[in-house]
Image (spheres, helix red, strand yellow):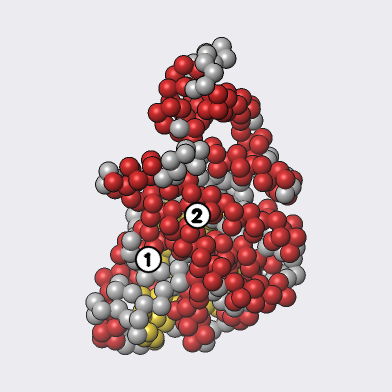
Amino acid sequence: MVTVNWNGREHLRNLLPSLQALQCKEVLVVDNGSRDGSQEFVRKSYPHLRLIENPTNQGFAHPCNQGARAASGRVVAFINNDMRADSGWLDEALPLLQGPVACVASRILDWDGQKIDFNGSSMQYLGFALQRDLGRLEEEVSHQERILFPCGGAFLADREVFLQVGGFDASYFAIFEDVDLGWRLWLSGHEVAFAPRSKTFHRGHATFELHANAKMRYLMHRNALMTIFKNYQEENFQRIVPLALRMAVKRAVLLSGVRKESFYLWAQARRELRSGDPLVQDRWIDALNHLVALDDVLEKLPRLIQQRRQIQALRKRPDAEILDLFKDPMRQIVEDVEYDMEEASWMESLQLDQLFRKRLDGSSLQERWGEKLQQVRAELDAAQWLANTAWQHPPAPSRPGLGSLLKSLRRHGLRITFNRILQRVRHGS
């Protein structure tokens, strides 16, 4: 059993007694250079446990691999330091770890054992993953027997298989390393099962609360790109990865607030930044997160290409047998109609809508919008007409509401006006 710790002495006071009660063969604590006395606490209070000490914070992925390599059992269990284990955590999961199943994910509840923290996995086609049913009451949810990936916070794995497929990718540091692992297990012919009665209790992202949110979002954007780069089979890789790079740039531009339709390209962005509004500053930081993540991925390209070759050499199962496990491939990751419409256009031209069509409750992206998207496009045509001609050739075509539309265009520009049109359409006004 492996737990990674960084300045989590107080968390270990709850976790380690719950692990001792399970009477497992061994417990390994991998410490990431803690400065809160964690190492001394483990050595003094739990001298029989194995303590691996790193001089600095190595993140989550690499220390887990260290623990797996140092472990001696056939099965290795991973649990976050800010959790406690239910008495049946191992017993409820171990029977499922047989045959093609090389990994068993546990159900994770909040500290009080009432609400869901992890009840299975979901992934958007660009690599952005979610924990299903987050925050819902346990008695309200159902579950799937097979899922794409476990939550790294609590799962069991066949130790030999875990190491054979490369364990966690240490370059992830944290965030989505479990997504990447699950995908690699499936493509190499193994399966990931979900054990709802194997439970742990989680305090929340206690470790990440010590970090700036920007760091987490940077890791999320970067690691999502690396995950899809390595794991899609060739045909899908050639269509999806270039689109992912394009949409990452698009998100950065949108978040920057730059009005490309304006002659004074940066004027609005400058005014917003000078206002000192912290929300504007956060938005710009997030825009930079996308660009820095993209730069990091491109910088790592030679290594990623090598990793991709190694992973694809293990492939025993085509994407067609894995994509059903995504569950929510067309989930919106940006609430912006300009972004959505460009994505829809690319999806259609690359025939990705056909790839995911049968796996969607609402079919393709265009069908998800349905008649509302047609209404928005009609309104966009009117807005574009106004933007190009209304100032020079009044009056505008006789359509209801165009007077206020013209005022909005003059004051706010096309993008903001268009988003307001969408809001009216969404609410039926």
What residue is drawn where x is 57% and y is 41%? 340
Q: Which mark is residue 83?
A: 1
For the residue pair 186 and 369, the one nearer the viewer reads as: 369
Q: Position of residue 359 (x, y in %)?
A: 69, 46
- When the figure is inspected, residue 367 is found, relative to residue 406, above or below; the finding is below
| 64 lies left or right of 234 | left
Q: Quadrant of residue 184?
A: bottom right
What residue is drawn where x is 44% and y is 47%? 255
How packed mark 1 is, by other alpha carbons closer than 10 Å (few <14, some 14-19, many 20 or more), is: many
Q: Position of residue 216 (x, y in %)?
A: 41, 61
| CA gap, disc 2 and disc 1 | 17 Å
For the residue pair 386 and 70, the one nearer the viewer reads as: 386
Q: Position of residue 167 (x, y in %)?
A: 56, 76
Residue situated furthest front in the rendering: 392
Q: Quadrant of residue 268?
A: top left
Q: Disc 2 or 1, which lies upstream in sequence? A: 1
- When the figure is inspected, residue 35 is found, relative to residue 11, above or below; the finding is below
Q: Which mark is residue 124?
A: none
Q: Position of residue 59 (x, y in %)?
A: 41, 74
The residue pinned by badge 2 equals: 131
What residue is drawn where x is 30% and y is 64%? 210
